[in-house]
Every structure is written in structure tokens, then in C-alpha cells.
Image (cartoon, rainbow, N blue to C red):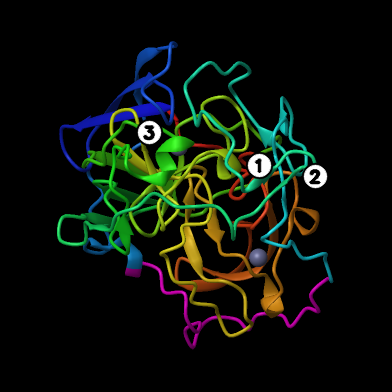
Amino acid sequence: MKQINVKRSSQFLALVAIVSLTACGGGGGSSSVSGSVATATPSPSTAPSQTATPFSTATPSTAPSSTATPIASATPTPVATINPAAVPLGDGMVSTSAQTGYVYSCATSFNGQGATTNGPWINTAAGTWSATAKIAVQGSVSWTTTASNSMVVSGNNFVITTNDLPNVGTTGTFPIAKSDPAYAYDQNGNSVAAQNLMFTLPMNPAVASTPSCLPNGPIGIFTDGVVMFNALDALGRDGGAHEVFDSCNGHPAPGNQYHHHEVPACIADVPDSTGHSGLYGYAFDGFAIYGLKGTGGTAVTDASLDACHGHTHAVLFHGTTQTIYHYHLTVEYPYTLGCYKGTPIAGF
Ligand SMILES: [Zn+2]
Ligand SMILES: [Zn+2]
């Protein structure tokens, strides 16, 4: 999918990203687009209001502070739960407008390389796949000593800097070895390597008048320091079903950019006092993405979320409890976002 190389002259000066589109998965795609983009950046005269903190601890997801307002004890709406052994297959659920259960995709044609063979965990007749039966790429490579990521608040923005290596868990061994059973289904030939990424996001994101589409490539950042991709594989299919990830639900794209298409399995969910899942990351419109559970600890589903895969209620956000839109992860496709509810930063 999208390979991002970021060069910056200074942490608080212009950010220039050279973007090229390549396939996610196998060995690169046939399409390629290049261009120069610049993101909105904080004023150079504005000093950061706090020092850089490790991204994973920048925004506590435990109890609200004493100044925070209580979270309303709303009764959770009962929704059908998803059986992880029979997750509805998301193939074909790609749209050109915001639609619940779909990925509103900026790309309308897909010609990259992806997983080559359906694994036995996919039941095309039933239209389901089994998250419990699906295999993972072998290996356990730790990056915790080389992972580097931080978040700095600067005025109305926060700046995330990351080298994209996961600060928790391990990755599998990539490229996928021929001796790995995963190779029969997915011949991902990319490696995991450090990137040089910086994202400037709004501290107080607003819902846009209309949702916008999700590009291939990075659409957000998880608290493990790893970028988030949408649910689609390089062929525009349900990547969660078809592609073989490692035990932390990640794999590398061309450019060796490690990423998650679905729930990052190695990030611990630290729920708040209501049982609502803790923070998992931020989309590129600045809105947060939380784990699998809504208020009361009830698992959220597509049916309980809007087309962009979120909803609005009181939640801990940037250290205070506030009623604000946010996304949720789900066991079912599209796993992360269905579209951008706010305005995404330029260049992505
Ligand atoms: Zn991928
Ligand atoms: Zn919620």
C-alpha cells in the first residue's frame, strides 16, 4: 500500500513527506504515485507545553482525574455479539460513500499483490472466517529496545514522532520463511524496518460536515507506535481474513513499514471505571480509537457504531473526560475505521 518516507528539517518546522503508493503484502504492486505534501504544523514560535513522553503512556486510560466530570452511567444498548470463530467475511464491502460495515475507500481499483491462497480458516460458502483457527506468522522478534515514539503537545496540536517499531510484544519473522506454514497462503516478502514518521494532529478535532474516504497506507497511529492501515488488503479484500499476520496482528508493507489492519493483539486494554475500553491510538483526523468494549464493558459491533465506526459519548480523551466522537475497534470487519469522521491531516 502506501510507503511513507518523512524528512523533517526540525521537529517544529515544515514537515515534508514523499509519498509513494505500493502494494501491501507480497512483493510490491504495479501502480505507483509520487508527490510532495506538507502537513499543518505548529507555529515555530510556540514552545511545546510539555516534554516528549513515551506515546504509550502519554494519555492515561485509567481513572479520570479529580477535575474530570463523571461519566454518565448510560445503559448499554444490547447488540448481537460476534462469534470470533465465524466472523462475517468482509470481501466486497468497499464503498464510494460512508456506509455502515463498509470501508469507504479512496482507492477504487486494486491491483497489488496480496495473500495468494485462501486459508482453511476462510469458509467462503458460509461467508465467514475464523479468527480462532487462523494461523499466525511464526517467530518472535522483539523491538522494544529500538522502538522510539513520543507525543508532544504543542498549542492546539499534538505531534507524534515514531520509528514505527512496536514498543510492546514481538513481530513475526519477516520475510515469511518458506518453512513457515503461513507461506502456503501469504508470501509476504517484506521485512520490518525502522521508519522516520511524524504526524501533527489536532488536540480538539471536530466532526466534518461530510465523512471522507480512507486511503491505502497509514490512516492512524496505535499506542504501540505502529501505523494503522484500513481493513483492505492490496486486492481490496478483507485483509483480516486473507492476509496472515503475526501474533500481534501486524505485518510489513513494501518499504518494510510494519502496520496493523485490525486489533493490535499485543496492546493491553486498560478499561476505564465504566468498563469502556482504553485508548488504542489516534486516527489521522485527531479522534481517538478505543478497544473492543463500549460503556458497561459490552462489546461494540458495526451495528452499534456509525458508518465511520464510531460514536459519541463521555470518554477519557487527552487526560480529561469529555463527550466527544471516537472510533472503536471491533472483532468484525472493518475492524478499525470505516471512514474519517473528522478532517484528516494533509498528505495521508
Ligand atoms: Zn498490510
Ligand atoms: Zn465508546
Q: Position of residue 27 (x, y in %)?
A: 36, 23
The part of the chain drawn in magenta is 57-77
Give the residue at mark 2.
Answer: 126
Residue that appears at 77% across and 37% down: 99
> How far apart are labels 3 and 2 at the CA level?
27 Å
Most foreground residue, 189 or 204: 189
**Camera-side mark, 1 or 2:** 2
Visible residue check, residue 15: no
- Residue 217 at x, y = what percent? 45, 32
Look at the image and tell me in which quarter the N terminus lies: top left
| Distance between mark 1 and mark 3 Cα atoms | 25 Å
Q: What is the secondary structure assignment of the residue under circle 3?
A: loop
In the image, residue 114 lies at what x, y percent? Answer: 49, 28
Q: Is residue 144 above or below residue 175?
A: below
> Which of the two discs, 1 and 3, sits closer to the camera?
3
Eyeballing the image, is 203 above or below 184?
Answer: below
Q: Residues within 10 Å of mark 3 (few under 14, many from 20)?
A: many
Left or right, 7 with respect to 240, comes to left
Picture disc at residue 338: 1
Viewer-nearest residue: 312 or 221: 221
Sooner in the amino-acid sequence: mark 1 or mark 2: 2
Q: Amino acid at mark 1?
A: Gly
Which disc, if any, is residue 188? Answer: 3
Assess whether residue 35 is covered by the magenta stretch.
no
Q: Amino acid at mark 3?
A: Asn
Mark 1 secondary-structure assignment: loop
